[in-house]
């Protein structure tokens, strides 16, 4: 299992391949549907430094506010990434992200963006909200909490040994594309349908 | 008879159980799946993490998944119990469970785009009340996540692209197509709730009600039992695997029901439930004693 510290650099990310297990440590920023719209609508210079050379985690966490005003992630598994397909490549390019963490994989536009900008797709285990929340050591700050609500806000967090698998790399490989193709062949044969 | 406030407390307990304790039949199915996958494969590692997560969540009574889903509720009640009171009590329970982080604030007003913050909104939770002849209340709850809800599918037969006619073979074709389209996006390995017949609304409701069944039960209707067994085998042959990583386990179970249809319509509704099949059931006596139902 490889370990990767965030923020990272382009050469390290380009060396990763589909199928690699990686444990991530360092700064990650969360963002899902509302965040992606917001990030592409205008350049958000207040959050840009947190995105540069780091990764964005597609998650809508359960968060507890502690009596001292700090926050704790109670449950935090990945959400489905496919919904960010229209925006992801632009967010990567504009803000210099080195990757995203999510589940379910993404499509052709993102895959092309990963190649162009030098980024990868890290797949976390969907539903493993407790295992993954335990890897979130600290909440550094949060953006758009009031406007977007807890699940959709952009949480800047520090993670330790956060387990992921590379399923789309910067060389144009996608495990999701491959599985889709293989299962389509099998479906055709089960339904005795022609090509 | 039941007081609204006491019932609310009991409903919070039911929500806590559903959100944090995965039913034993689901855990068993996940264990068997893990043993079947190739040692060291992505599929086996995914299932291993899933099982570790189930254990952690159960031990700490914390949500198994951060998407605590839509609460889908079915309540059987004796004559004379107010269904408005039951719905109110359950809605209040959702709010209290949300305040206690047993549920995520999971309801958004689509007009204002604001999260309501308390877990409730028109249609959330969905409470189906049905009168029966017994003197107890029986409550069944499913917490159904959004990722898996998004990959549900409905077909209107005939469908020439799938070669699906208006018969059980047509149903089979739709179900396999839905599993293929879902890939890993619904958090495979999933559980399929299927309804053929009904209208577009009732068909989906029945397909979800099928998800209340234990994974190891058998359909009492022989043709449907045979179709469930066959689809279980064939869906797994698609090789999509846990999380869509590839592997032998794509679904953990297939449950099929049906409703009457109009001569003009033949719908096949497929609800995909993620591996975190968060189900809880309880029988509540008039004195308030709770018997948990798996």
Image (cartoon, rainbow, N blue to C red):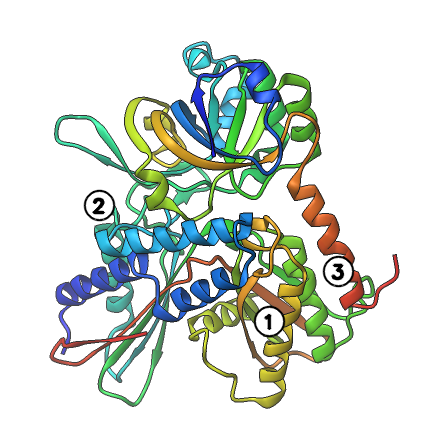
* Chain of the residue displaying label 2: B
Badge 1 or badge 2: first in the primary sequence: 2
| Disc number for residue B232 | 1
* Horizontal arrangement in the rendering, residue B17 relative to residue A24 (left or right): left
- Marks 3 and 1: same chain? no
Q: Residue at x 84, y 64 (%)?
A: A193
Q: Depth check: B107 or A13 in front?
A: A13
Whether tag 1 and tag 2 are in contact, CB under 8 A, the answer is no
Residue A91 visible from this viewpoint: no
Cα distance between the residues tagged 1 and 2: 39 Å
- Marks 1 and 2: same chain? yes
Quarter of the rendering containing residue B290: bottom left
Q: Position of residue B280 (x, y in %)?
A: 32, 67
According to the picture, the residue beneath numbered tag 3 turns out to be: A186
Q: Position of residue A21 (x, y in %)?
A: 51, 36
Q: Position of residue A10 (x, y in %)?
A: 57, 15
Residue A64 visible from this viewpoint: yes
According to the picture, the residue beneath numbered tag 2 turns out to be: B99
Whether tag 3 and tag 1 are in contact, CB under 8 A, the answer is no
Neighbor class of circle 2 (other Cα within 10 Å; few <14, some 14-19, many 20+) is some
């Amino acid at each position: 299992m490889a370990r990767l510290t965030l923020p990272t650099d382009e050469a390290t990310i380009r060396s990763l391949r589909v199928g690699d297990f990686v444990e991530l440590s360092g700064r990650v920023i969360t963002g899902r549907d509302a965040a992606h719209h917001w990030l592409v609508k205008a350049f958000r210079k207040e959050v840009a430094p947190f995105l540069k050379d780091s990764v964005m985690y597609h998650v809508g966490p359960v968060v507890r506010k502690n009596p001292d005003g700090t926050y704790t992630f109670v449950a935090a598994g990945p959400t489905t990434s496919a919904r960010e397909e229209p925006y992801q490549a632009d967010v990567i390019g504009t803000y210099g992200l080195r990757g995203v963490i999510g589940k379910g994989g993404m499509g052709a536009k993102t895959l092309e963006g990963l190649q162009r900008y030098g980024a990868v797709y890290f797949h976390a285990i969907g539903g493993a909200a407790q295992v993954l929340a335990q890897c979130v050591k600290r909440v550094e700050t949060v953006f758009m909490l009031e406007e977007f609500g807890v699940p959709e806000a952009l949480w800047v967090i520090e993670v330790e040994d956060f387990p992921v698998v590379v399923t789309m790399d910067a060389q144009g490989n996608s495990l999701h594309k491959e599985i889709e193709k293989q299962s389509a062949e099998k479906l055709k044969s089960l339904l005795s349908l022609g090509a | 008879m039941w007081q609204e406030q006491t019932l609310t407390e009991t409903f919070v307990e039911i929500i806590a159980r559903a959100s944090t304790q995965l039913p034993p039949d689901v855990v068993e199915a996940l264990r068997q799946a893990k043993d079947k996958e190739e040692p060291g494969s992505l599929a086996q590692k995914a299932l291993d993490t899933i099982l570790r997560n189930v254990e952690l969540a159960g031990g700490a009574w914390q949500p198994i998944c951060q998407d605590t889903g839509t609460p889908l509720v079915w309540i059987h009640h004796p004559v004379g119990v107010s269904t408005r009171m039951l719905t109110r009590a359950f809605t209040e329970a959702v709010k209290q469970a949300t305040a206690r982080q047993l549920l995520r604030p999971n309801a958004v007003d689509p007009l204002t785009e604001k999260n309501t913050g308390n877990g409730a909104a028109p249609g959330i939770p969905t409470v189906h009340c049905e009168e029966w002849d017994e003197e107890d209340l029986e409550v069944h709850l499913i917490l159904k996540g959004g990722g898996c809800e998004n990959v549900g599918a409905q077909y209107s037969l005939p469908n020439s692209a799938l070669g699906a006619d208006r018969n059980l073979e047509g149903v089979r074709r739709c179900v396999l197509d839905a599993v293929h389209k879902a890939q890993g996006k619904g958090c495979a390995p999933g559980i399929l709730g299927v309804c053929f017949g009904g209208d577009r609304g009732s068909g989906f409701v029945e397909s979800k009600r099928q998800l209340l069944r234990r994974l190891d039960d058998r359909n009492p209707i022989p043709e449907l039992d045979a179709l469930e067994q066959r689809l279980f085998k064939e869906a797994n042959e698609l090789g999509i695997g846990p999380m869509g990583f590839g592997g032998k386990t794509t679904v953990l179970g297939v449950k099929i029901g049906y409703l009457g249809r109009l001569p003009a319509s033949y719908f096949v509704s497929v609800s995909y439930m993620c591996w975190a099949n968060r189900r809880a059931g309880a029988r509540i006596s008039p004195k308030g004693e709770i018997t948990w139902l798996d």
